Amino acid sequence: MAQPGPLTQLARRILQYAEDLDTFYASNNLPLPSFSADAPHSFHADITTHPEIHNTRHSLIDATKELRDLIIGPRDTLKWMIMNDHTLAASLHVISHFNVAQAVPLTGPISFKDLSDIVGLSELDVTRFVRRTAINRIFVETEPGYVSHTATSALLATDPQMQALVAHMSEEAFPASTRIVDALEISKTNNSATGAANESPSPFALAFGSSFFERKAAQPDTLQRFGLAMSSWSSGDGAHQMVTCYDWGSLPAGARVVDVGGALGHISLAIANAFPELSFVVQDQAPLAEQSSELIASHSESVRDRVKFLPWDFFQPQPEQAQDADVYILRYILHDWADENAKKILTNILNATGPASRVLIADAVMPPPGVLPRCQEEVLRSFDVSMLAQLNSQERTLEMWQALVGKAGEGRWRILDVIPPPKGESITILEVGQ
């Protein structure tokens, strides 16, 4: 008998992964995955409790894509990818903007004619965009001319976070990404003229006439939508990781912590609740002061007496109240800024420190290629391009973080410890000191 070829070998691996997952579902009495409208919206297993089954799931995702890519071949891969991806994104934009998913009954079908009357589009257009997304199992045409929900379209119809994510990516991130080449061309021309490397203009600003944060300040509804969209990527608010992944108990009684760009202060409040010997200053923009005060006041007296909100712009030198603190937190701040601005933020903090101060940079650290499963790495690579498009920034590798800390601290500061994220989290904690 001839030896099995590469396709058969790959198919056998896929079969083994699928059998392992079926066994896990059965042994844990979990519902099987399905496209039906009432199917589960997420993979059931907790990644901390069952890391091995998540590895199997990722391996199955990567193996099935590998098989598909091999069968499609290079020519059709390029043709289908460049054609299909942007038309799907455009169709989802229509579905999102006109609330099509919300207009489809959660149970039972609706005709394209009735759906078009509800959303105010022609029957032709409703049909074309629903059918385009239905190819990806977002909606299903149960009989000719009638559409019903699948699990994915039902999620879009009922989940505000997913609605916000699709709307933000469609209406802001995607238009910004179409201006990346324009921004790079401008940068290339400027660099050729001056002979020096210059920061390229923001693709987002080219698309909208203002920077990301300027647009958010002028249109608060887009800021609220962005917050909801980002919350769709993780469960919880990240406080548990910040409480447990650093040795706060090693700090002396009465130690002061400055939470730079700490929003309303939920991270500081969580740490304060767990470590009653520490006091906190939460810094962020003045418009957040009232909401922050309400959040702080909702906690017990023993906590709220140790957490204060201080309106502050982190591009300015740190004020007297924040000088010589024991720890400074920068959680998901620096990845929003290109190197020059990130350096300014970090330098202002380092200039305020004492000899024993530490700075905790809690942010993404991009791994080298091939470390993560391809399905996970693809998301990170997409984030990196999206950071360029929207914020003219990037996700940084450990080497990039080391270089940034070295420049901001003029060689006197370095990364002392790298605390990797726990299973299921994406934020690495970099402890910076002298």
Image (cartoon, rainbow, N blue to C red):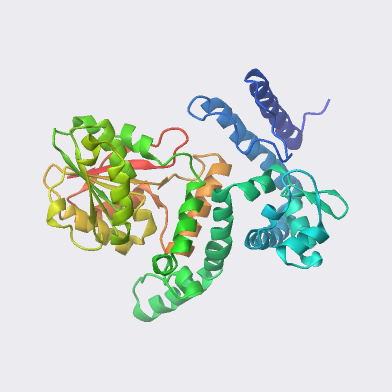
- The mark total stands at 0
- Is 220 situated left or right of 306 in this image? right
Give residue 190's quadrant in the image. bottom left
In the current view of this chain or complex, which residue is farthest to the right? 144
Q: Residue at x 21, y 32 (%)?
A: 276
Q: Where residue 301 appears, x then y in whole percent?
A: 23, 37
- Up the image or down, 30 lies above or below 38; here it is above
**Residue extending farthest bottom:** 193
- Where residue 205 appears, x then y in whole percent? 45, 72
| Towards the viewer: 83 or 267 | 267
Q: Is residue 414 visible?
A: yes
Q: Residue at x 22, y 30 (%)?
A: 249
Position of residue 236 measured from the top left corner of the image (x, y, whole percent): 44, 39
| Picture quadrant where residue 171 is located | bottom right
Q: Describe residue 78's horizontal placement relative to residue 140 as left or right.
A: left
| Quarter of the C terminus within the rendering | top left
Q: Is residue 326 above or below residue 8?
A: below
Q: Residue at x 48, y 62 (%)?
A: 222
Quarter of image, res 275: top left
